[in-house]
Amino acid sequence: MSGFWLNILIVVHVLVALAIIGLVLLQHGKGADMGSGFGGGASGSLFGATGSANFLSRTTGVLATIFFLLSLALAYVATKKPVEGPGGVMDAVRSRPALEEKKSAAEESKPKPPAPASQPAGKEVPQ
């Protein structure tokens, strides 16, 4: 799965989680029904006295199901092995010394500058 679709899954997962949090906070507790019996004004709301509880409960259930399915999908994607690239972190670490050896071999194969005229041709000056 490409990185784009993984990012989309994560964003949708976070949005569903925030929606569940909001819906749970909007719902009335079990003791809130007592207040509506004494004229709490819940019967004049958009959904009626019991309509909001059913709507919010069902919506929360649907979002919880979506959240659960997205969690399973993300777990599947996280455990799926990549087809291309190195197998792990240690493979990249092991290949680094090989690259350094290639660089040092390339530097050794470069021609050395000629010796100064004051020195004999066979001897090199230590640096």
Image: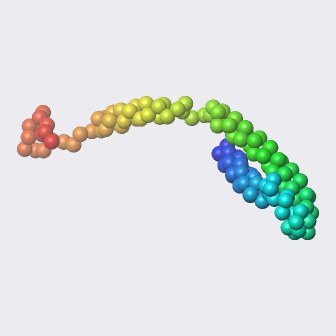
Q: Nearer the viewer, residue 105 or 28?
A: 28
Q: Residue at x 40, y 31 (%)?
A: 98
State how many labels appear.
0
Residue 61 horizontal side relative to residue 121, left or right: right
| Closer-to-camera residue (58/80) | 58
Quadrant location, the C terminus? top left
| Residue drawn at (43%, 30%) of the image | 94
Quadrant position of residue 67: top right
- For this rendering, which residue is in front, 8 or 4? 8
Left or right of 124 in this view: 73: right
Residue 8, position as x, y percentages in the image = 70, 50
Tell me: 125 left or right of 101: left
Q: Quadrant of the N terminus?
A: top right
> As rendered, which of 25 and 16 lies closer to the eye?
25
Residue at image location 7% in from the left, 44% down from the top: 118
Q: Is residue 18 above or below residue 118?
A: below
Find residue 51 and report its horizontal and vertical position in percent. Answer: 91, 58
Residue 33 seen: yes
Residue appearing at x 44%, y 34% in the figure: 93
Give left or right: position of 28 versus 51.
Answer: left
Colouring convention used in this rendered image of the protein: rainbow
Q: In the rendered image, is residue 102 in sight?
A: no
Question: Whole-percent x and y of residue 87?
Answer: 55, 30
